Image: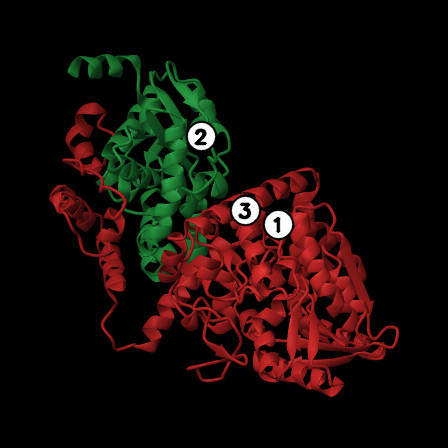
Chain colours: A green, B red
């Protein structure tokens, strides 16, 4: 299958390891992966902050970039949600019916990572090894826009060595919310504080999720508190193998 | 009146031209500033956390037990959309039916007009005191304050609304207006404000309820005029419907000689049979009950009662004009969205600054007033989507918030078309300029390592300081994913282009 990785702007610029892990994982499962370099951003930040006109060229760029791929995989529930629920609508609002049709068609081939693995590839055991105590935070857009449901849990349960601990009040928002984290920084922090307490209550080594944005927020709070819990993207856990941990173990 | 709401005097907003909707719909302070105060109140956070968690669990249980909830919800949305699409027909039909059955219908274009009509009607009876059924419409128009300026006392008879009134406080929740109070605070209010209360009153809920019952009983028996809102009005028959838990509503609706009902024009249902949908949706979504204890219905003037119905617009027609916002008028005021909202749970209702708090308030108030008068409310959400899932009439609040945010940005620009762009608009414009060109984007990503230096700075300027107040900035990578890809890609499988 000809798969394109839509890395998302955040992963491309700040969390490239998440992109590398997604590539490694999909290759290990026997697929050819491409990273089209004309990709930039899904435009969700512009839309959700009130600047939809500025997102329109980004919608067009996304549709053009990924026009020829059988499947497009993004390591983000939020960006996938924007592509699926906002792109065509935005094009329509600005009177571009052609782009709307194109956007709808590309969106139908765009998958969040856990959806792609479970629904399209039909795997839950991806051959990963990750010997840590892990709790999973379902990000709001994975949960409520995409309805990924138990897919991430099914993937995590098959990871060798991984001890999965249930997160209390898991479905409560972490407080990131894009520019909400800045515009309403104090409310965002109050939500984060409760999320961090829940994470710490699990006594996990690692908090994982399907979105680097929420993890940047949760992780930024946890390191500030020197909480001793790391945030690691789901893709990085699923990409880990026994070989990796031997290599890393030696390096340490 | 506290600093939490817009300054009003007799229902008239001070400092604004009286055009468009009036009443208590405008937040006096930006949401982040009001939220700051609320977040500092540890008692409030605890009270709200406990109360919303309890109601959330109850609601989830009774909604979960219905096999056809999704169907009911879709029916509720469809019926309300039909009402909104044919409001002109249904309203006239309602007026005809109510009039035919001996009631009098009045039309009020805004809060001021509604308050004037009600006050005139009360004056005609000669009464100096009225009893009230809990009603959002009368809160919206600031009726109690308006009546006070005319020398008429309005007594709230819903227990929570009474607590708020006695405490000289403001409601902070649509259904449970005193949700921000715990029982020991309520005891203090009763001891301080209730004439003749037993000084040995405890904070045991039955004891508090009994004290309120004694306090109210005399007023029910003496009242000549009652004022209510309405949960539903049936266009087909002219029947009004009030749904409640305590029985105070039933007493207000039946005992006094004059009954005045104030109702937003969107509260209509086409036919009697539509109640079968809404009387299932509402109690389960609001109190988490299968059925509410008291459902009162009346048609026109009954048993020699003098009945007046005031139909209130106050910005609703303007809201109807926006195809992307009008679904907010489906709202049946159940408050399920408040109880599941992570923002509401932390800030409480006062931070929203208008009578409609929480997610629905963040989409309704700015539409009723026009977004320029409530510009921070559409941003008071992390867009987590819990409200949409909980809404019994499927109002897509997150999408509506996003839409209203663009209206706020446009309104700011339109108000000062020649002014330089705000820092936010400039930043958004710059980001879009970079991101719409892959070459510019590739080069821009090479600046990410600069973040290493920024991270070392002790104090930062906004907006970064808003992030670093509680969160570390991420440690930037040495190279972007795309630069790694180009460097490694050709060696690995040569598939990149």
Depth check: give the residue in front, B316 or B463. Answer: B463
Q: Residue at x 32, y 24 (%)?
A: A205
Position of residue B145 in the picture relative to residue A124 (left or right): right
Chain to which mark 1 belongs: B
- The relative height of residue B486 versus residue A241 in the rendered view (above or below) is below
| Residue A101 in view of the camera | no
Chain assignment, label 2: A
Per the image, label 2 sits on a secondary structure element best described as loop
Q: CA distance from mark 2 to mark 3?
A: 20 Å
From the image, tell me which residue sits under label 2: A167
Q: Are marks 1 and 2 in contact (CB under 8 Å)?
A: no
Front one among B347 and A132: B347
Which labelled disc corresponds to residue B202? 1
Are the residues flagged by discs 2 and 3 in contact, CB closer than 8 Å?
Answer: no
Label 3 neighbourhood size at 10 Å, few (<14), some (14-19), many (20+)? many
Is disc 2 on the same chain as disc 1?
Answer: no
Q: Secondary structure at mark 3?
A: helix
Q: In the rendered image, which residue does mark 3 sit on?
A: B52
Q: In the current view of this chain or complex, which residue is farthest to the front?
A: B199
């Amino acid at each position: 299958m000809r798969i394109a990785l839509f890395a998302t702007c955040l992963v491309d610029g700040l969390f490239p390891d998440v992109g590398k892990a997604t590539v490694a994982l999909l290759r290990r499962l026997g697929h050819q992966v491409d990273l089209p370099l004309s990709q930039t951003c899904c435009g969700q930040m512009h839309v959700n902050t009130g600047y939809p006109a500025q997102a329109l060229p980004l919608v067009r760029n996304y549709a053009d970039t990924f026009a020829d791929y059988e499947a497009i995989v993004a390591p983000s529930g939020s960006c996938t949600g924007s592509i699926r629920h906002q792109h065509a609508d935005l094009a329509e609002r600005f009177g571009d019916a052609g782009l709307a049709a194109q956007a709808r068609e590309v969106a139908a081939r765009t998958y969040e990572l856990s959806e792609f693995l479970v629904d399209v590839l039909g795997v839950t055991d991806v051959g990963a090894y990750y010997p840590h105590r892990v709790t999973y935070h379902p990000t709001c857009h994975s949960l409520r826009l995409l309805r990924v449901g138990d897919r991430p849990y099914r993937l995590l349960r098959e990871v060798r060595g991984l001890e999965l601990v249930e997160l209390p009040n898991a479905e409560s928002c972490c407080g990131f919310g894009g520019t909400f984290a800045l515009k309403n920084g104090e409310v965002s922090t109050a939500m984060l504080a409760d999320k961090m307490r829940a994470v710490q209550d699990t006594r996990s080594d690692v908090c994982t999720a399907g979105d680097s944005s929420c993890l940047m927020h949760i992780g930024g709070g946890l390191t500030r508190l020197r909480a001793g819990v790391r945030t690691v993207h789901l893709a990085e856990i699923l990409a880990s193998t026994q070989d990796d941990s031997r290599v890393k173990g030696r390096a340490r | 009146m506290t600093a939490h709401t817009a300054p009003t005097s007799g229902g008239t907003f001070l400092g604004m031209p009286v055009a468009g909707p009036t009443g208590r719909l405008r937040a006096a302070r930006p949401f982040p500033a009001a939220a700051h105060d609320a977040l500092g109140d540890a008692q409030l956070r605890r009270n709200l956390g406990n109360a919303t968690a309890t109601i959330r669990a109850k609601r989830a249980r009774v909604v979960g037990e219905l096999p056809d909830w999704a169907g009911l919800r879709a029916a509720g949305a469809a019926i309300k959309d039909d009402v909104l699409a044919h409001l002109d027909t249904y309203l006239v039909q309602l007026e005809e039916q109510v009039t035919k059955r001996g009631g009098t219908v009045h039309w009020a274009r805004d809060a001021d007009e509604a308050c004037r009509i009600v006050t005139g009607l009360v004056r005609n009876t000669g009464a100096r005191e009225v009893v009230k059924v809990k009603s959002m419409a009368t809160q919206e128009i600031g009726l109690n304050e308006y009546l006070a300026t005319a020398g008429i006392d309005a007594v709230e008879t819903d227990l929570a609304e009474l607590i708020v009134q006695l405490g000289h406080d403001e409601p902070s929740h649509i259904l449970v207006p005193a949700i921000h109070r715990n029982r020991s605070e309520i005891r203090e209010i009763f001891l301080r404000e209730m004439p003749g209360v037993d000084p040995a009153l405890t904070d045991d809920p039955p004891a508090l309820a009994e004290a309120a019952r004694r306090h109210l009983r005399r007023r029910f028996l003496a009242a000549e005029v009652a004022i209510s809102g309405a949960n539903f009005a049936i266009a087909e028959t002219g029947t009004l419907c009030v749904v409640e838990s305590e029985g105070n509503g039933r007493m207000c609706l039946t005992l006094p000689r004059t009954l005045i009902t104030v109702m937003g024009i969107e509260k209509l249902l086409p036919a009697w049979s539509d109640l079968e949908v809404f009387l299932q949706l509402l109690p389960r979504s609001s109190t988490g009950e299968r059925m509410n204890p008291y459902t009162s219905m009346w048609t026109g003037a009954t048993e020699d009662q003098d009945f007046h119905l005031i139909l209130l617009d106050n910005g609703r027609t303007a809201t109807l004009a926006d195809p992307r916002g009008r679904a907010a008028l489906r709202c049946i005021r159940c408050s399920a969205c408040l109880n599941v909202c992570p923002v509401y749970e932390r800030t409480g209702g006062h931070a929203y600054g208008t009578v409609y708090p929480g997610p629905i308030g963040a989409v309704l108030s700015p539409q009723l007033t026009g977004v320029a008068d409530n510009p921070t409310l559409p941003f008071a959400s992390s867009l987590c989507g819990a409200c949409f899932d909980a809404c019994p009439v499927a109002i897509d609040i997150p999408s509506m918030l996003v839409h209203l945010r663009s209206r706020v940005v446009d309104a700011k620009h339109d108000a000062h078309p020649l002014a330089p762009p705000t820092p936010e608009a400039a930043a958004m414009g710059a980001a879009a300029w970079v991101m719409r060109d892959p070459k510019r984007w590739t080069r821009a990503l090479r600046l990410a390592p600069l973040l290493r230096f920024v991270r070392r700075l002790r104090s930062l300027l906004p907006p970064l300081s808003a992030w670093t107040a509680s969160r570390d900035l991420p440690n930037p990578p040495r190279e972007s994913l795309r630069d790694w890809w180009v460097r490694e890609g050709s060696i690995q499988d040569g598939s990149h282009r």
